[in-house]
Image (cartoon, rainbow, N blue to C red):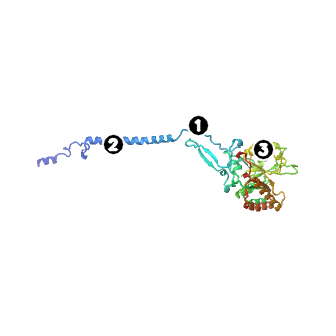
Amino acid sequence: MAQSIKEIERPLGQDRRPDVPGRRFGMGVKQIAGLVAMLVLVGISGAIALRDKPFRKAEEIAAVKPAPSPALQTKPEPTASKPADPASLAAARPDGPQIIHVQPTDTGGAAGITVRDPSALGQNLATAHMPDRALIEDSATGPLPIRAADGRRPFDVYARPWSGGRGARVAIVIGGLAVSQTGTQAAITKLPAEVTLAFAPQGNSIGRWMQEARRRGHEIVMQIPLEPFDYPNVNPGRNTLTVDADADENLKNLRWALSRTTNYTAVMNYMGARFATDAGAMEPIIAELGKRGLGYLDDGSTARSVASEIALKEGVPLAIGDTTIDAVQDRGSILKKLDQLEATARAKGFAIGIGSAFNVTVDAVDAWADEAKKRGIEIVPISAVATDPQRR
């Protein structure tokens, strides 16, 4: 009992032995040291795993990413539109699919291969009335057509799509639009969309009529007044290109006509029996069309025209009319000419007829085209039957 009292009176904690780590948990020093060693080992292993993972990923990426080859480096494309030498450009719209090698910029690896449908170059008909800014050069008189920096031509982009078939094809071009407002409206609304329309540069509201024609699916061309025999008694109109004028003057007048509107594929002579036979006068004009990516339509009225040889030399798409369908403005006569066109198309594959926006012509072409389609004739735009040196 006395021992118990002494123990009670002893100051609190005076009899406690020093704590040994782990004793209260039943662990000795050896066990604690082992646990610490195990924790250190786990920590070091985790750190190594976390450290090595990104290096392994980098090694895997390096294994599949070849070093860029100097031979495959490409120069950046120019951003500004400017005339291009047709001889230095690949064919912008070849027949059949086009294989394009694409250099990837992210890996620098071998070029991929893409097969592109050449018809994809053309505009969607829903937006055909909207000019492509890449194909326009601004000038004091209005927008001038020009090749895009990537080589695309107005001849390709503004062309109306067609089947691409090899059956009998007839292209009909109706000119003189924008001279008469009622006649222009009738031609745009009544004629089948496959008929090509030609605008006179002296006309009015050409931009508005161009948009209306393109909305309705027509391909369009621009008429250029060229000197006929007995000029100026026979006068094609304002800013006529003449044999006696120097090249600079004729090019100035040409550019004025070209700037009257946009979204056309080619130019077409208006008169010009004398001008078209003079190689010295014609060559600068055809060369200018080649630089701008346009085609040339010769109405076929002058057998001695030199357009064919010069167009081939300058890389300009060329079409030549087979007949004028309304030299006699009579419905029966026009229908007979159209039947002759059909016969020519069946014989050589295609034929081109030229007419003007007279009411009798528009009505006759409209009626004949419906029947011709039933007989297996395809009505096509002028671009579909042009000879294009860049497609050879």
Secondary element type, mark 1 = helix
Q: Answer with mark 1 or mark 3, whichever residue precedes in sequence.
A: 1
Tell me whether the residue at label 2 lies in contact with that at label 3, contact meaning CB atoms closer than 8 angstroms. Answer: no
Residue 360 locus on image (x, y percent): 81, 61
Residue, far left: 1
The number of callouts visible is 3
Q: Which mark is residue 310?
A: 3
Q: Amino acid at mark 1?
A: Pro
Secondary element type, mark 3 = helix
**In this orientation, which residue lies closer to the viewer: 17 or 46?**
46
Which mark is in front, 2 or 1? Answer: 1
Spatial CA span between label 2 and label 3 = 90 Å
Q: Residues within 10 Å of mark 3 (few under 14, many from 20)?
A: some
Q: Which mark is residue 39?
A: 2
Secondary element type, mark 2 = helix
Spatial CA span between label 2 and label 1 = 53 Å
Left or right placement of residue 58 versus residue 39 in this view: right
